[in-house]
Amino acid sequence: MRAPYTQLYVHLVWATWDRWPWLGPDLRPAVYSAIQAQANGAGADIVAIGGMPDHVHVVTRFPTTISIADLVRRLKGATSHLMTHEVRPGESFRWQGGYGAFTVSRAVLPRVRDYVLNQEQHHGAGSLHAALEATQEP
């Protein structure tokens, strides 16, 4: 049986509980590595990961075998486990319950990737795209 050929891209964003600034520059590499590993295990290809101390952005090409909700659940779960069992054992790290998910066409994928990879510059310059930062309905 042949596998389907798809180009399904999604930009995900989720925040720490109460937007607490847990994810300093020292912790982001470990969190991003856990996101990468979990995505690979789910059959998703990471295009970009970026963020700030209080939230994470992920652009991924995802397979037809997993829903966006399940992918986010896996990514958030793996990073929560990492934080509470390895990075900061005994501390009460957690993510907010919601997340933002935005489909991305292949034509704009490079711009969205650059936006995610340059989060610190966008936040510092105030050049944010509000719609791409949302983690809940307004």
Image (cartoon, rainbow, N blue to C red):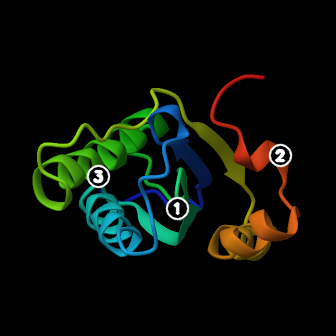
Q: Which secondary structure lies at badge 1?
A: strand
Instruction: Name the disc covering residue 11, or none.
Output: none
Q: Measure the alpha-carbon separation of dots 3 and 2.
A: 25 Å
Q: Residue at x 23, y 53 (%)?
A: 83
**From the viewer's perspective, is 119 left or right of 46?**
right
Q: What residue does disc 1 label?
A: 60
**Residue 19 location (% of width, % of height):** 54, 40
> Is residue 21 placed above or below 73 in the rendered structure?
below
Q: Quadrant of residue 73?
A: top left
Q: Kindly report which numbered mark, 2 or 1, lies closer to the viewer in this rendering.
A: 2
Q: Callout 1 environment at 10 Å: few (<14), some (14 to 19), or many (20+)?
A: many
Amino acid tagged 1: Thr
Where residue 138 appears, x then y in whole percent?
78, 23
Kind of residue sitting beneath label 3: Thr
> Does residue 40 appear in this view?
yes
Return the residue at label 3.
79
> Which residue is found at the position 68% from the left and 71% from the top?
120
Tag 3: Cα neighbours inside 10 Å, few (<14), some, or many (≥20)?
Answer: many
Residue 2 location (% of width, % of height): 36, 60
Disc 2 to disc 1, C-alpha distance: 20 Å
Q: Looking at the rendering, which quadrant does residue 104 occupy?
A: bottom right
Q: Nearer the viewer, residue 110 or 121?
A: 121
- Which comes sooner in the sequence, label 3 or label 2? 3
Residue 88 as seen in the image, left or right of residue 66:
left
**Badge 2 or badge 1: first in the primary sequence:** 1
For the residues carrying marks 3 and 1, which lies nearer the camera in this image? 3
Q: Which residue is mark 2?
A: 130
Q: Nearer the viewer, residue 138 or 24?
A: 24
